[in-house]
Amino acid sequence: MDQGYARTTTKQIARLAGVNEATLFRRYGGKPQLLVSAIRQPLQNVPLRTMTATDDVEADLRHIVESYLETNRQVGAIFPLLLVEASRHPELRPALEVAWDNVGYVIRMIEHHQARGTLQKEPPLTTLAAFIGPLLVTGMLRKAHPEQPMIDVDGHVQAFLHGRAQTQPEP
């Protein structure tokens, strides 16, 4: 699906999978069902799904970064691509359910730290975007320029906390 949903054909998929195109139609019914199934499966087994909050905000944020990077390594840029494609092709929206479940694990961790007063209170999705956004952009830039340095996980966490930590925990 790297070339987009509309330009991806079942013939290409069958060739990549090493099966007859008719086999794909018998098993999945059509391109939308095939792609939804192909997208959902790998997203159900990514590190983002293993996250649980602790009382150590720095460790949790490091865990989010490391899980995000490993998830991206495993499934590539499937989530951003899926967001774009599902907006154009509603038949792909069922694949977003698993992706949103993964985002939910991170959101719950952010909410935990907001409730404890270790992260500022704002919509958790805003916090998530502010935290993950630089990782997403850096990853995209590294694809174009692989010589760029890898993400400094601790540096990213510290820079984020410097701008988003509460100055004093709320009572």
Image: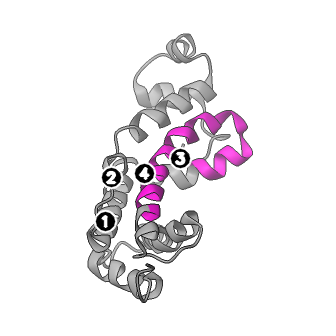
**Which structural element holds mark 3?**
helix
For marks 2 and 1, give the CA distance: 8 Å
Discs 4, 3 touching: Cβ within 8 Å? no
Please name the amino acid that badge 4 sits on: Tyr
Dividing the picture into quarters, in which one does residue 124 lie?
bottom right
Q: Is residue 151 left or right of residue 135?
A: left
Closer to the chain start, of discs 3 and 2, is 2
Return the residue at label 3.
100
- Residue displayed at 40% across by 37% down: 44
For marks 4 and 3, give the CA distance: 9 Å
What label does residue 51 carry, if any?
2
Please state which of the two labelled residues, at mark 3 or mark 1, is closer to the viewer: 1
Closer to the chain start, of discs 1 and 4, is 1
Residue 77 position within the rendered picture, expressed as x and y whole percent measured from the top left: 47, 54
Return the residue at label 1.
60
Dividing the picture into quarters, in which one does residue 95 lie?
top right
Neighbours of disc 1 within 10 Å: few (<14), some (14-19), many (20+): many
Closer to the chain start, of discs 2 and 4, is 2
Discs 2, 1 touching: Cβ within 8 Å? yes
Residue 136 position within the rendered picture, expressed as x and y whole percent measured from the top left: 47, 67
Please name the amino acid that badge 2 sits on: Met
Toward the front, the furthest residue is 171
For marks 2 and 4, give the CA distance: 6 Å
Task: Specify the segment rendered in magenta.
Answer: 82-111
**Which structural element holds mark 1?**
helix
Discs 2, 4 touching: Cβ within 8 Å? yes
